[in-house]
Image (tube, grey):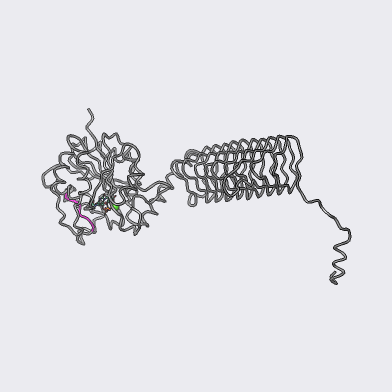
Amino acid sequence: MARELTVLVLAAGRGTRMRSAVAKVLHPVLGRPLLAWPLAVARALSATRRGVIVGFQAEAVTKTLPAGFEAVLQRELNGTGHAVLQARRLFAGEGDTVVLSGDTPLLNAATVRRLLADHRRRRATVSFLTARHADPSGYGRVVRDERGEVRAIVEHDDADAATRRIDEVNAGVYCFENRFLDRALGRLRAANRQEEYYLTDVIAAAVRSGRGVVGVLCDDAEEMLGVNDRVQLARVHDVLRRRVLERLMRAGVTVVDPASTWVEPGVRVGADSVLLPGTTLQGGTVVGARCRIGPHTRVRDSRIGPDSVVADCCVLEEAALGPRCRVGPFARLRPGTRLAAGVHVGNFVETKKARLGAGAKAGHLSYLGDAEIGRRVNVGAGTITCNYDGYAKHQTVIGDDVFIGSDTQLVAPVRVGKGALIAAGTTVTKDVPAGALAVSRAPQKTVAGWADRRRALLGKK
Ligand code: UD1
Ligand code: CA
């Protein structure tokens, strides 16, 4: 039978070095809180119990926890050892406990699985991951004896000059045998520079009692990068961003300029699509095959059908586009926009809660809000749906094959029947029946010779 496994994620700290009013683990990384990344690792492990230690801004942090995680409150922030101690009841009895840090987002689940397998095979009491860092400052240093066996972890603040020169650091990822962990935590003392109960002191305690302690050096130091300040936050952000882009590129997506392209991890993009420089794809966005997006376009929580083009500088939010649509440049599709196949939405067009039927066109300078627009409708330049009367929003319904001339206002609620024609410059205030012409215009007056006479009067050429 598999041994019981508990996974704990430490997330109670304030993150003083961030110099922020917001808890460190809540700072966003590619659209998710920093904490979400280690939680994904915790979720990928087959554990019986999963706990997150919360403290600073506990309520806000707890809100971000997905199902299956129990929040454990650390009332006073007395260090990482004290933090783990609060979750004591989650690792009572036989089994092992994996501890992860809420501020180490690059870690892969596979790396933790290897650590755990190794820990169990060797029947170790404590196993932990280490890495070599060119600049180890800030991290706990791994002190080994002449045979290479781990003796202790010494925190940066408590280390002397010789210890500070050690470049092997504690990554903050551990496996503990439960009974030992429970006993050792109860005996921790806060006799150090920070006057905190260090989880890392459990390692020296295990060594002293002659138990198996294994420090596993990881080749990929990048995976172990922790976030303590905003410089490190930017660094891990960049690594995660590149990981997502590389996955897309390997799956057949062209990313013209990876340095300026931002794609969040939940986004899907079909093969042979091209992301032009400055493109940002967020949330649950799904882009079909053979699309062209950007440059400098942002798409959030939207679906874009195959063979579509969303050109320069567009913003799409909660919009759904069928196949072969052409959008932009400079279009803004707001929530509730639904474009059927082959729709064209051109420059300086804004849509909101608007459905456009197959083959409909709105080429230039329009606002289409709360509108139902039929198939093959031509929306002329400068058309505005006047959907708001200062109190409520009203619906505009336009039938198939309607032609709307330029500079038309549709004062909602209003309906235009199939195949009708609205003359340019019309303010539509009454429903228009199918097949009709609607025109509302002051009649044009033409005065022959007027301009010439004026010029003569003013003595101009
Ligand atoms: C810690 C390790 C250090 C290691 C480094 C790796 C200790 C004493 N030191 O240092 O050896 O090299 O991580 O990144 O463990 N936390 C709590 N409650 C507390 C204090 C901290 O939950 O009372 C949480 C924090 O929110 C954070 C994690 O524990 O997610 C680590 O705390 P942090 O203060 O960042 O420790 P480091 O100084 O980075
Ligand atoms: Ca840290």
Residue extending farthest left: 209
Residue 18 position within the rendered picture, expressed as x and y whole percent measured from the top left: 34, 57
Measured as percent of width and height from the top left, residue 435 is found at 75, 35
The chief SS type of the magenta part is strand
Q: Which residues are magenta?
A: 151-156
Residue lying furthest front in this view?
Answer: 391
351 sits left or right of 423 in the view? left
- Position of 275 compared to 114: left or right? right
Vertical position of residue 278 compared to residue 6: above or below: below
Q: Farthest residue to the top: give it.
A: 1
Query: What is the count of numbered marks?
Result: 0
Q: Is residue 239 magenta?
A: no
Residue 154 is one of the magenta-drawn residues: yes
Left or right: 270 as drawn, with respect to 18: right
Q: Position of residue 187 (x, y in %)?
A: 13, 48
Is residue 396 visible to us here?
A: yes
Image quadrant containing the C terminus:
bottom right
Does any portion of residue 217 appear in the rendered image? no
Nearer to us in this view, 37 or 206: 37
Give the quadrant of residue 1.
Answer: top left
Q: Quadrant of residue 451?
A: bottom right
Which of 341/458 is in front?
A: 458
Question: What's the residue at 15%, 39% (across, down)?
Answer: 179
Residue in view at x 85 percent, y 66 percent = 454
Q: Position of residue 13 (x, y in %)?
A: 28, 52
What residue appears at the point 23 percent right and 30 percent down from the top-left corner?
Answer: 2
Pick the residue in front: 258 or 72: 72
* Residue drawn 24% across the image and 53% down it: 140
